[in-house]
Amino acid sequence: MFLYLPIAEISVNVLVFLFLGIAVGTLSGIFGVGGGFLMTPLLIFLGIPPAVAVGTEANQIIASSVSGVMAHWRRGNVDFKMGGILLIGGIIGSTFGVWLFRLLRELGQIDLVIMLSYVVFLGSIGLLMLVESLRTMRRSRSPNANRRKLHQHNFLHGLPFKMRFRRSKLYISALLPLLIGVGVGILSAIMGVGGGFIMVPAMIYILGMPTAVVVGTSLFQIIFVTANATFLQATINQTVDVVLAILLMLGAVIGAQVGTRLGAKLRGEQLRGLLALMVLTVCGKIVYDLIATPADLFYLVTGAAH
Amino acid sequence: MVTGIFAAWLIMSAGATRAQSEDPPVVVDLSKDFVAITAGFTGTEVLLFGTFEGKGQVIVIVEGPANNATIRMKERVAGIWVNGSEVSFEHVPAFYQILATEELGDWLPQSLREEYHIGLDHLNIRPLGDVSPGDKKMFRDALIRNKQEAGHYGRGPGKMRLVGGRLFRSTVFFPADVQVGVYSIRTFLIQDQKVVSTQVLPLAINKTGMEAELYRAAHQHSALYGLAAIVIAVLAGLGGNMLFRRN
């Protein structure tokens, strides 16, 4: 069953994209991640023009983040104050990111920057998760292994503009979440992702937030950052394909349900190991594409297909 | 159904030929003069058919709207393929396909090919800015190769079937990612290495229905389109969450 996408301007198999939505939605249901960091490269592998993949994925992430944040909000796991500061940083960062995106596109190197960013982030996060899950598996066998300190003090706690974040049980400088927001905002504009996969570890390891509120707070601010990105992409580049976005959202809604049920049954460290392998596989494919000699050294930039 | 149209047209044209003596020696028509890109569009085939008087060869050129196109070369830097130099060309047709009743040969002299831009070697593609002749050829060849790969340029002249020595027919395939716009179908009747008759037909390819509306909205009312996209996503998220709660 084929459907012509009005903005991507290609004809696609509906079932393939529904399945992709379900698969990535299942993963986000299990792990509480948006899934953009997997979806965007997969869309590009399937022949969606990179610019449309980035713009449309931003649109789809809004849906999965709204859905996710509701569940966390009901359990009181959203730190709105922290989320607000991250969000201010995120808006600044993504606006700068869009500017950087345009500059790099004029230089003709945007594809390379997108792909290298994916290699760096997918590679390092995939490896970290793999090591972490292997360590947990080993630790569960030997219960006497040493544990990480709950709260560590370092130079970051000497920064000015200290603020109390009650929900996160933190008293830290507001500059810290602001800067993290800016950094993730830049990346999300360039890579076409919500940034949860970078935000979540940054909140845990740099800010020291309790794990329970991390995912909800991250999702809360991702809604607004991706809404901003969707609007910018729609008005500046006209690269948001709503037909494709709706296809992916449908799949993601079904997948998220499957994922939450599966997540409850499966063991955490094995799941994390599995996700790590998937992330590394996608990363490997991008690396392969970067170093393998292309069939044709020349390619059409504009005037290819419209 | 197409053969039905073809037969009906033959009868009509036969009648017309008898009635008028001033008829042009070559007449051609298409199975449709409008290609609609709808939700289920996966490319389409258009039947082209016609007749000519006397001896000679018929050549048909199907050409899409011309635009600028940029072709870029990949270069290896530190083991990674990065984007290298690029060349932009103007007057690049989006689509180009030749159909002929005979293999191209002496009957179509070089002077005619140049004059009427017949054949990929004679396309009026010109580089923008200063480009060395060597680079120009390399990038021009690459441009044509890429277009052929995408099915937008023919790999060689397509063969037209000749019936009874004066009726010809053939099909042209437009792939799913064909560019919208007005295409021109130029038909030449060649006798003794000279063009004795030409006919030009337009073929419009456009999006229709929901596809066209969405495309127009995205480009003409992009702010509203963006806001609508956000609202749809929020509603989808809330809807998904309600399904969650029930379970």
Image: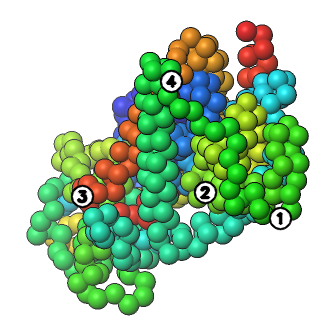
Image coords of residue A222 (percent x, y): 73, 44
Q: Identify the residue position indicated by label 1 in the image.
A: A160
Q: Is residue B19 left or right of residue B220?
A: left
| Chain of the residue under the numbered disc 1 shown in the image | A
Q: Earlier in the sequence, mark 1 or mark 2?
A: 1
The three-letter code of the residue at mark 2 reads Leu
The three-letter code of the residue at mark 1 reads Pro
Q: Earlier in the sequence, mark 3 or mark 4?
A: 4
The answer to whether the residues at label 2 and label 3 have Cβ atoms under 8 Å apart is no
Q: Nearer the viewer, mark 4 or mark 2?
A: 4
- Structural distance between the alpha carbons of marks 2 and 3: 28 Å
Q: Earlier in the sequence, mark 3 or mark 1?
A: 1
Q: Is residue B71 left or right of residue B100?
A: right
| Chain of the residue under the numbered disc 2 shown in the image | A
Q: Residue at x 51, y 39 (%)?
A: A38
Q: Identify the residue position indicated by label 3 in the image.
A: A293
- Structural distance between the alpha carbons of marks 1 and 2: 26 Å
